[in-house]
Image: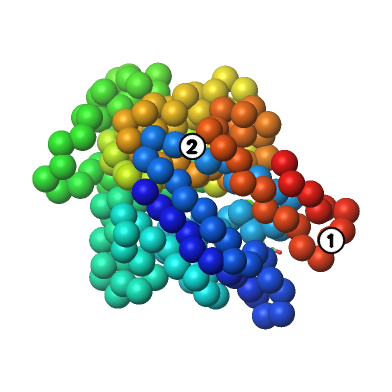
Amino acid sequence: MITLRKLTKSFGPRVLWRDLDLTVEPGRMLALVGASGSGKTTLLNCMGLLERPTSGQVLFQGTDLSSLGPARQRRFRRDHLGYLFQDYALIENATVRANLDVARRRGARPPGRAEALARVGLAGREQERVHHLSGGEQQRVALARLIVKRPALVLADEPTGALDSDNAAMVVDTLRQLSREGCAVVIATHDPAVRDACDSTRALEARGRPEGLGRA
Ligand SMILES: Nc1ncnc2c1ncn2[C@@H]1O[C@H](COP(=O)(O)OP(=O)(O)O)[C@@H](O)[C@H]1O
Ligand SMILES: [Mg+2]
């Protein structure tokens, strides 16, 4: 379970969000919505320890992650965190198989590559190079990588932003399966279908732009 406690992020004088409290339990999916520029990506990055909040705490299973040293932060990312991006973030010049192998943890016994690829409709495609795959197929590889890794927390940043509706549905279905298996999932999204597939929604306000105010 991940909990944000009184989390604030500013860039200079500009406050993105202030005193944000939020909890995502295992098995739950949270949609993070809000106008472009409202700080969705920055919030995911603070949860994934890629950026530091200005103040407040990020608690994972009771530990304040921001108080950990760099080595333990890396271990948290390696062992517990999965990321899914709009632009897939795969190793382009490598095979499907190599992209899945970077996620495999030593000693862990997750579903194998073959099973993960079958679950996303890419059975038998291990040897293909990623740059030969379509966008939808590349996002399926990124999903298979999450299935192999089995992270406790998945952070997805506009994961359907570049996909057609069939591939978008595959993303949502796979994230739902991961959550059923006990994963906590947070999805920043503009897509109403993705938002509606989540268990709850948190809207970030666009600050300093009156026309963008409002909560979903
Ligand atoms: N490193 C940074 N320095 C200054 N401003 C930043 C930085 N990173 C993001 N921002 C600003 O913070 C705001 C929120 O960005 P972002 O989190 O990407 O929003 P969203 O994902 O909701 O579109 C934007 O106005 C962006 O320009
Ligand atoms: Mg963003």
Instruction: Left or right? Give the position of 65 relative to 31.
Output: left
Residue 129 seen in the figure: no
Q: Is mark 2 on a helix, strand or loop?
A: strand
Q: What element carries label 1?
A: loop
Q: Where is residue 90 in the image (x, y as percent from the top left)?
A: 42, 45
Q: Is residue 24 above or below residue 73?
A: above
**Which label number is shown at residue 209?**
1
Q: In which quarter of the image is the C terminus?
A: top right
Q: Which of marks 1 and 2 is nearer the N terminus?
A: 2
Residue 118 seen in the figure: yes
**Which label number is shown at residue 201?**
none
Looking at the rendered structure, the kind of residue marked 2 is Met
**Count of residue discs:** 2
Q: Which of 65 and 116 is in front in this view?
A: 65
Q: Where is residue 126 in the image (x, y as percent from the top left)?
A: 30, 29
Q: In this view, does 208 lie above or below 26?
A: below
Q: Position of residue 201 (x, y in %)?
A: 61, 41
Q: In this view, does 33 lie above or below 7?
A: above
Looking at the rendered structure, the kind of residue marked 1 is Arg
Instruction: Left or right? Give the position of 198 relative to 33.
Output: left
- Are the residues flagged by discs 1 and 2 in contact, CB closer than 8 Å? no
Instruction: Left or right? Give the position of 193 relative to 25.
Output: right
Which residue is painted at 44% across and 36% down in the image? 28
Characterize the local packing of mark 1: few (<14), some (14-19) or many (20 or more) Cα atoms within 10 angstroms: few
Which residue is painted at 11% across and 45% down in the image? 107
Q: In this view, does 149 lie above or below 192?
A: below
Q: Which of 21 and 172 is in front in this view?
A: 21
Which residue is painted at 40% across and 43% down in the image? 25
Q: Mark 2 points at which residue?
A: 29
Which residue is painted at 32% across and 59% down in the image? 62
